[in-house]
Image: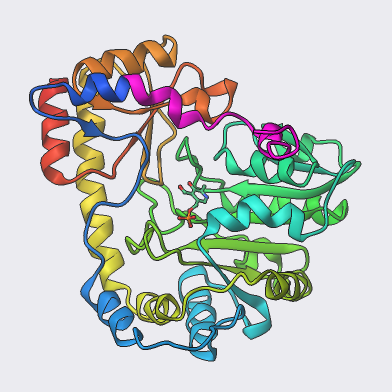
Amino acid sequence: MSSSASAVSSRLPDFPWDKLEPYKATAAAHPGGIVDLSVGTPVDPVPDIIQKALAEAADSPGYPTVWGTPRLRDAISGWCERRLGARGVGHRNVLPVVGSKELVAWLPVQLGLGPGDRVAHPRLAYPTYEVGARLARAEPVGYDDPTELDPAGLKLLWLNSPSNPTGRVLSKEELTRIVAWAREHGVLVFSDECYLELGWEAEPVSVLHPQVCGGSYDGLVAVHSLSKRSNLAGYRAAFLAGDERVLGELLEVRKHGGMMTAAPTQAAVVAALGDDEHVRVQRERYAARRTALREALLKHGFRIEHSEASLYLWATRDESCWDTIGHLAGLGILAAPGDFYGPAGNRFVRVALTATDERVRAAVARLS
Ligand SMILES: Cc1ncc(COP(=O)(O)O)c(C=O)c1O
């Protein structure tokens, strides 16, 4: 490709999953077949009520809107009040997005950030926060405690609780302290809460909770996704809630950019947010898989850190993550190497809970 054609991709890190391919081939050669616990893509069915809502909206010849239907906005604000404990979430406080990955990747561009601006994210993190900063030519900065960052030039602070990859949860007190610091320094906070409904040994709290935000959404936006809690990764469905000035600006930019959620997906999200039962059922599936995998990994000699929430176990054998990946691949099990999430993860692997019960049983048998 000519140098101008590759000018953007050359600013980005190598797509890390390609490095896992040889290990995937080893695991796939296991006589019992591969148990793929690497990517974390949902495998259970889309709940019937959601499929039905999608199908009923199949005749959607016209353009949808970026802001979504009034029913969708009602469903989002109702859910935020019911599940997050947020108060006074009006239509101007919500914005649908086309899955949260595109939002994370393009947010710095859509906020107008560029050279000289800094975007902070947890040191161990979902790689797309860094990608987003690089797409805007802003500077990505990793942190252990965001309140220790130099606020000069810091325009955007990503929080992620529960965390991918570690499953760590920030307490209400920690969130309150971070929000106060960010407001004092005029730093916009985006809180990626896409695993909020998957707390096991901790109860994740939103930045929109009144005890964290003090009843005002100034400078705060929460990011939520239906991919994991409702098995809707294939539908591309997520939304933002919070500061109406920030969301109003993003709405304008995204209207020009044509960032519309498909109309059948919008209808499906209304059904999904109105039903808590399928989330309970899905949680139970993950809880059982988590218990089985956790015990098997511990018996096999792993140590597990954090992992009190989310869809992952953050596990180590106190060796290079690639040695662990090789060892597991020999057992026909594929995990994600911790260094995909930053150099600080290079002695851990991330084990996803997103495999069928049958595949999880196979993994447990091979680990024992
Ligand atoms: C922390 C975090 N944020 C965002 C996403 C993107 O999810 P989606 O684009 O499916 O909404 C993921 C996906 O794994 C994630 O782990």
Front residue of 204/19: it is 19
For residue 316, which quarter of the picture?
A: top left
Front residue of 362/222: it is 362
Residue located at (38% from left, 53% from top):
198
Q: Please identify the quadrant where the C terminus is shown.
A: top left
Residue located at (34% from left, 64% from top):
230
Rendered position, 196 above or below 53: above
Rendered position, 7 above or below 195: above
- Residue interval drawn in magenta: 1-22
Residue 13 image point, x, y percent: 62, 30
Residue 195 image point, x, y percent: 45, 53
Front residue of 135/204: it is 135
Residue 255 image point, x, y percent: 69, 76
Q: Please identify the quadrant where the N terminus is shown.
A: top right
Rendered position, 264 above or below 138: below
Is residue 143 at all visible to an observer of this figure? no
Q: Does the magenta stretch include residue 6?
A: yes
